[in-house]
Image: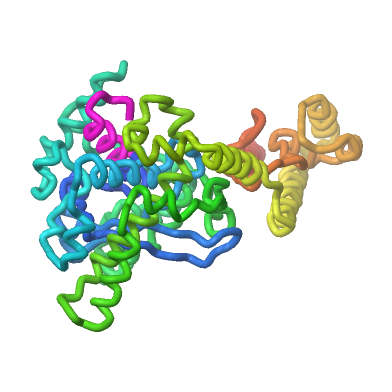
């Protein structure tokens, strides 16, 4: 975004974020076109979701299906927000590069379908980019960074990073396969139908967007709750609403050539304009006067107004509120059950150790030693644990009672928190140690 050539900088930012979010390979990025996008609405809690789906109909990804979709959702962390960077790129191309996208859709001119999203230069917007074209722009930006990249592998880094992140977040192999569109040898559903659905990749989208594995109940982000004035949206895409009404009417009455993909494109563009403004406070915070949008008179005028300052404060407050939102009663109950389950397992392990060792005192000594370890349990629990063998595992796990958000709870369970390992790792380690001790006892 700070790269001198704004087309190159925005293109790379959108390429990297989309590549990570949707598992795009070089073939997908080379031929991603505007007519392959649509908006999916998901009526979920705590907030309804809007998912942008991008498709590819070329390259290795589609040997088993003519068109493959990948879903994109707003990222919980503003500086990693895929849709924010994609909206920057699209609106730059419409307002600065002057792509006649909306005008051609309004004229029922199907030549608009040839326009690509990612290209090295506006003169190349209607032609499929080569691997060299896109790797060149990526390497230009990478050359400004301290770390060097291997040129032959640069277009695959996003897929590799995304796969590693999903595996580390304990995603199932099926979810990972749908996200990366890796075909399975058995079953037509696995090879064709499942990857065609934009929402089939939603679990992976949620994990990569920082929401953990419970995305459907924990996907809210603050800036998405703040309404954007319609006039601000219209200032970025003038006449888009008029064009949308005209295209809808034409498609419904069949007065011209039906163009439902054109309708989807206009709807997606309006949604991106809304996303643009919701992420604008963070763009200003990150790039300051170097933000490209300030060269647009309408954006500059709005940003300098008192209404924008109020909007900016609303967005920042909403982010703080939703990111620090306490656990819901359902999540509190769920993690209470998890805590009890861990304690029950630790008791079983401790008794197993006692039966193998044939003596009681060493375990009590261990329990007493563990009382000095910093845990999230309260003092009453620690006092009772002096005579309970389960304290050995509880002290190692350190389940918290004062978690401030669902995300913290998920982080604690899957990756550990406050210096404590994840509970499943501790349980597995204790079972392995007990079994090994039992085997040694039987052989002696």
- Quadrant for residue 420, please give it: top right
Q: In screen coordinates, is 411 left or right of 239?
A: right
As rendered, which of 128 and 60 lies closer to the eye?
Answer: 128
Magenta-highlighted residues: 1-16
**Relative to 98, 89 lies left or right:** right
Residue 178 can be seen, yes or no: no
- Residue 138 or residue 334, whichever sits in front: 138
Q: Residue at x 24, y 76 (%)?
A: 250
Image quadrant where one finds the C terminus = top right
Quadrant of the rendered image containing residue 277: top left
Q: Is residue 364 left or right of residue 91?
A: right
Count of numbered badges drawn on the protein? 0
Residue 279 on image: x %, y %: 46, 41
User: How far across and down, in percent of the image, does residue 269 sit?
Assistant: 32, 55
Which of the image's four quarters has the N terminus? Answer: top left
Residue 375: which quarter of the image?
A: top right
Residue 12 image position (x, y, % from top left)? 26, 35
Residue 245 seen anywhere in this rendered image of the structure: yes
Q: Is residue 144 magenta?
A: no
- Frontmost residue, 443 versus 61: 61
- Residues 332 and 386: in front is 332
Name above or below for residue 243 compared with residue 301.
below
Residue drawn where x is 68% and y is 46% of the image? 325
Is 160 on the left or on the right of 307, as rendered? left
Residue 4 screen position, x and y as percent: 25, 24
Residue shown at 19% from the left, 81% from the top: 255
Q: Main secondary structure of the magenta part?
A: helix
Q: Residue at x 21, y 64 (%)?
A: 106
Which residue is outermost to the bottom? Answer: 253
| Colour pattern of the rendering | rainbow
């Amino acid at each position: 975004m700070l790269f001198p050539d704004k087309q190159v900088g925005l293109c790379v930012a959108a390429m990297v974020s989309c590549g990570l979010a949707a598992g795009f390979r070089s073939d997908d990025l080379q031929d991603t076109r505007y007519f392959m996008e649509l908006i999916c609405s998901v009526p979920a809690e705590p907030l309804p979701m809007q998912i942008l789906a991008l498709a590819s109909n070329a390259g290795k990804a589609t040997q088993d299906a003519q068109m493959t979709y990948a879903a994109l959702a707003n990222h919980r962390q503003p500086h990693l927000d895929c849709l924010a960077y994609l909206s920057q790129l699209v609106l730059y191309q419409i307002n600065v590069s002057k792509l006649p996208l909306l005008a051609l859709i309004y004229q029922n001119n199907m030549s608009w379908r040839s326009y690509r999203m990612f290209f090295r230069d506006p003169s190349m917007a209607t032609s499929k980019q080569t691997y060299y074209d896109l790797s060149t722009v990526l390497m230009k930006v990478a050359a400004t960074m301290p770390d060097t990249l291997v040129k032959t592998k640069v277009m695959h880094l996003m897929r590799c990073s995304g796969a590693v992140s999903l595996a580390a977040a304990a995603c199932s192999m099926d979810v990972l396969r749908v996200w990366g569109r890796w075909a399975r040898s058995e079953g037509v559903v696995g090879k064709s139908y499942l990857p065609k659905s934009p929402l089939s990749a939603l679990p992976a989208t949620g994990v990569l967007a920082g929401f953990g594995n419970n995305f459907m109940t924990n996907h809210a982000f603050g800036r998405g709750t703040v309404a954007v004035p319609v006039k601000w949206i219209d200032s970025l895409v003038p006449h888009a609403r008029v064009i949308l009404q005209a295209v809808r009417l034409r498609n419904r009455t069949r007065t011209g050539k039906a163009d439902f993909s054109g309708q989807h494109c206009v709807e997606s563009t309006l949604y991106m304009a809304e996303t643009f403004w919701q992420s604008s406070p963070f763009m200003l915070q990150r790039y300051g006067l170097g933000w490209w949008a300030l060269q647009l008179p309408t954006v500059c005028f709005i940003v300098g107004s008192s209404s924008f300052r109020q909007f900016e404060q609303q967005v920042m407050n909403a982010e703080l509120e939703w990111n620090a939102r306490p656990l819901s009663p359902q999540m509190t109950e769920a993690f209470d059950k998890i805590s009890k389950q861990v304690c029950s397992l630790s008791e079983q392990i401790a008794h197993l150790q006692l039966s193998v060792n044939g003596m009681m005192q060493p375990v009590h000594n261990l329990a007493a030693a563990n009382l000095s370890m910093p845990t999230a349990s309260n003092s009453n629990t620690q006092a009772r644990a002096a005579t309970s063998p389960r304290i050995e595992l509880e002290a190692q796990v350190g389940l918290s009672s004062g978690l401030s958000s669902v995300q913290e709870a998920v982080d604690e369970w899957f990756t550990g928190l406050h210096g404590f390992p994840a509970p499943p790792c501790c349980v597995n380690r204790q079972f392995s140690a007990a079994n090994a001790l039992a085997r040694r006892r039987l052989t002696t």
